[in-house]
Image (cartoon, rainbow, N blue to C red):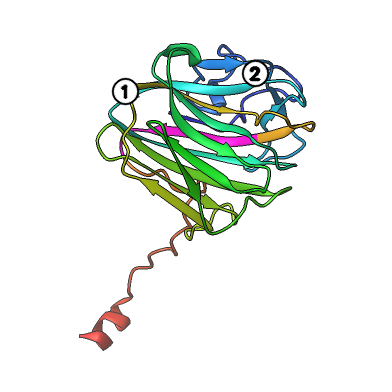
């Protein structure tokens, strides 16, 4: 399940009904009033903007024993609050199983099955796009990577825990960190049961394959 938010209209509230099409797989959970925005985008022309000083977020409902999450975030201030939340029932209800939290010092916490682990190596870079990738499992614990260089293959900070999710996860929700007084942005959100997702960029094009001429073939043979 993947969503680029590129099929919406600037300034329009994101809903389950208008979140599919050119954006990708329709979202299955909306909290508050996130909107489509052209102000900051990772993959143009649009991204998801969460309302300043008001709770909002978007999510998928994917049931699995192990799953991977990827999203891009453009955060404008450091606060203590949730950034990714995992629930054991649909529509963001039931028991909170874990996720990612921001901290006032810019660091992150990985939460899984009642255990909280510091994400060490770097703080979140503000006012630029960053990428976050996480794996959560009922049998192999959890891990997360922060990429301050948004499409890099080398993480800026990592964390893992052997503690497993406390139950089967159903809703995966990226949300506006609590306490912020400015708009925050998200883009290229994806959830998978197949393996790590990696950057949301097209691979570099391959050079065209040119057939060897008869003279070239003769010189090589």
Query: Which is nearer the N-term, disc 2 or disc 1?
Result: 2
In the displayed structure image, the side of residue 202 where residue 176 appears, left or right = right
In the displayed structure image, the side of residue 90 where residue 122 appears, left or right = right
Quick check: is 192 in the magenta stretch?
Answer: yes
Q: Residues within 10 Å of mark 1 (few under 14, many from 20)?
A: some
x and y, in percent, of residue 90 in the image: 43, 12
Secondary structure mainly formed by the magenta segment = strand
Which numbered disc covers residue 167?
1
Rendered position, 80 above or below 211: above
Q: Nearer the viewer, mark 2 or mark 1?
A: 1
- Front-most of 115 and 68? 115
x and y, in percent, of residue 41 in the image: 68, 40
Residue beneath the point at 37% across and 33% down: 192
Quick check: is 121 in the magenta stretch?
Answer: no
Pick out the residue farthest to the front.
Answer: 115
Which numbered disc covers residue 14?
2
Rendered position, 107 above or below 153: above
State how far apart marks 2 and 1 are (Cα): 29 Å
Residue beneath the point at 60% across and 29% down: 5
Which quadrant, please, contains the N terminus?
Answer: top left
Residue beneath the point at 69% across and 41% down: 75
Which numbered disc covers residue 66?
none
Highlighted range, magenta: 186-194
Mark 1 element type: loop
Mark 2 element type: loop
Which quadrant, please, contains the C terminus?
Answer: bottom left
x and y, in percent, of residue 54 in the image: 73, 20
- Front-most of 29 and 142? 142
Residue beneath the point at 77% across and 26% down: 52
x and y, in percent, of residue 110 in the image: 47, 41
């Amino acid at each position: 399940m993947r969503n680029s938010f590129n099929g919406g209209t600037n300034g329009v509230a994101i809903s389950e009904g208008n979140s599919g099409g050119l954006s990708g797989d329709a979202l299955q959970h909306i909290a508050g009033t996130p909107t489509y925005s052209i102000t900051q985008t990772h993959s143009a022309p649009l991204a998801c903007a969460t309302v300043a000083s008001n709770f909002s977020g978007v999510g998928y409902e994917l049931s699995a024993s192990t799953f991977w999450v990827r999203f891009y975030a453009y955060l404008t201030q450091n606060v203590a609050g949730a950034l990714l939340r995992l629930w054991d029932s649909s529509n963001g209800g039931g028991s909170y199983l874990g996720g990612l939290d921001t901290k006032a010092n810019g660091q992150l916490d990985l939460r899984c099955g009642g255990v909280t682990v510091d994400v060490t190596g770097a703080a979140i870079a503000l006012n630029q796009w960053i990428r976050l990738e996480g794996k959560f499992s009922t049998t192999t614990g959890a891990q997360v990577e922060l990429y301050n260089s948004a499409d890099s293959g080398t993480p800026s900070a990592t964390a893992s825990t052997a503690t497993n999710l406390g139950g089967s996860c159903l809703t995966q929700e990226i949300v506006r960190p609590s306490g912020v007084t400015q708009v925050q942005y998200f883009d290229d959100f994806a959830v998978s049961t197949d393996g790590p997702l990696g950057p949301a960029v097209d691979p570099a094009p391959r050079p065209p394959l040119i057939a060897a001429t008869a003279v070239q073939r003769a010189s090589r043979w």
